[in-house]
Image: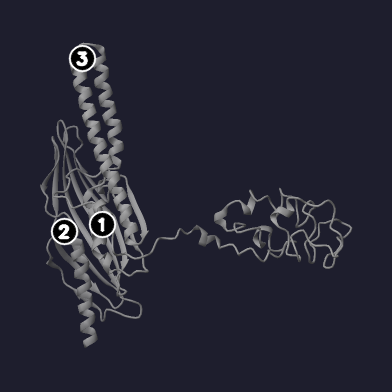
Amino acid sequence: MAHQPPGGQGGGGWRGSDWRQPQAGPPPAAPGYQQPQAQGYGQAPQQGWGPPPQQQGYGQQPQQGYGQHPQQGYGHQPQQGYGQQGYGQQAYGQQGAYRQAPPQMPKPPEPEAMMVVPSPVGPHWPLDPGLLFALPHRSAEAAATPAHAEMQLSIQGAVPHVLGEVARLHALDKEAEAGRKRLRNICIALGVVGFLTWIFFIGVAIVIAAFVLWFVRKGKYDKADIDDRQLELISSTLVTFAGELKTNRPAKVIADFRGADKQPALSHHQTGTGLFEMEQNQFAYQHHWCLMRFVLADGVAVAVDVETKLKRKTKQKRKYTKKKDIIVHEVQVRLQPPKGKSFGVHQQGHPNPHALPGLQLKRALIKPKQATFVFRTPPSRRVCGRGGWSWFDPNGQLESTELVGAIIYAYRTAARVRKAFTAA
């Protein structure tokens, strides 16, 4: 009977369990196996299984060469695609003795494909009532205090998947608000106890502990405190268009919930030295905080960008610094027609301050392959004095209904131009 190779019936090559238990001495001569030359096993075999893994050459010892231990080298990181699905040709090299992979082993996937996390793309509608209940609701008035959150959102997938992430951030926001209230009540109670026991040294320690606890823990809760209106703006827009989206195309949302004043200032102008003259500063900020991408059922791609522009003036007082903010929100809606179609001829629209309630149309440009509409809110003003932040003119806050209206207005305008061009 002819000698069978250690990999199994036929000459299919060495398996992982075979080369870890090498046979003593070279294998007996068999058809298809060439005896190595006098200089040893350093030469590559012409065909067959190859020399034993103890010797030098292409079948080196486990600590060298391409035949390494499965926990090291190319067989260590699964995301690189080498040796994940078995000990095939990529696990032992392409020019060595182990040239052929076992036929029953599937081909390992490419490294790029393994590193990509598949996004859940599925039906965008209907939505779970429990999910809708967990989403943030529209508040009556926006908070005047600037945002201190340091949370960001970047997600792509079906609308229920994206809304689930928004609901999770909303739950974290509510937990941070509740924790800050508990912290305030605890610090107030410690302050009262410390005041009542002021005659003893323990009272001073209690008051100091209350101040330290407040300033240390409050910053942690502020980092997770997101503006509810920003979350509601994203969730309401996706809920409104969920039934109109293409099923096999995901929705994409990128949001930065940090305040506009946390960004680098575009410009800074200072007057006064602060010694003999009153110091005044003027800052200009621009914060592109929201990006949404989705495709409608008719194939029209919608891209929405929301930007906040802030101008701040500070004036140094004797005991505090007075601040005045002017806030303007800008919405840019870009539409792209389906593949093989166009919006018609090149056309430019004129600014319309009464295009939508609460929004002004600043610019409109319709090209055959893209339509761009830019909307802007009226300026809103807030002031920071001795008692903190308060609204001087709260009008001009961007609402979710206004954002949805801007998308519908842009879509209908582009469709009207396309219809007129087709009829002509």
> Would residue 223 be seen by someone viewing this image from the given angle?
yes
In front of the other: label 3 or label 1? 1
Q: Is residue 80 left or right of residue 87?
A: left
CA gap between label 3 and label 1 equals 53 Å
In front of the other: label 2 or label 1? 1
**SS for callout 1:** helix
Taking depth in this image into account, of 423 and 18 the one nearest to the observer is 18
Give the residue drawn at x 13%, y 50%: 140
Give the residue drawn at x 68%, y 60%: 93
Q: Contact, CB < 8 Å: mark 3 with mark 2?
A: no
Q: Residue furthest right?
A: 38
Q: Establish if 342 lies above or below 237.
A: below
Q: Quadrant of the N terminus?
A: bottom right
Please state the horizontal and vertical placement of residue 233, each as a whole percent of the image: 23, 56
**SS for callout 3:** loop
Q: Amino acid at mark 1?
A: Pro
Give the residue drawn at x 73%, y 54%: 18
Q: Amino acid at mark 2?
A: Thr
CA gap between label 3 and label 2 equals 54 Å
Q: Residues within 10 Å of mark 1 (few under 14, many from 20)?
A: few
Q: Establish if 355 lies above or below 22.
A: below
Taking depth in this image into account, of 86 and 200 the one nearest to the observer is 86
Which is more N-terminal, label 2 or label 3?
3
Q: Contact, CB < 8 Å: mark 2 with mark 1?
A: no
**SS for callout 2:** loop
Q: Residue furthest top?
A: 200
Please state the horizontal and vertical placement of residue 242, each as a whole percent of the image: 28, 64
CA gap between label 2 and label 1 equals 32 Å
Q: Which residue is mark 2?
A: 377
Q: Which mark is residue 129?
A: 1
Which is more N-terminal, label 1 or label 2?
1
Residue 48 position by quadrant: bottom right
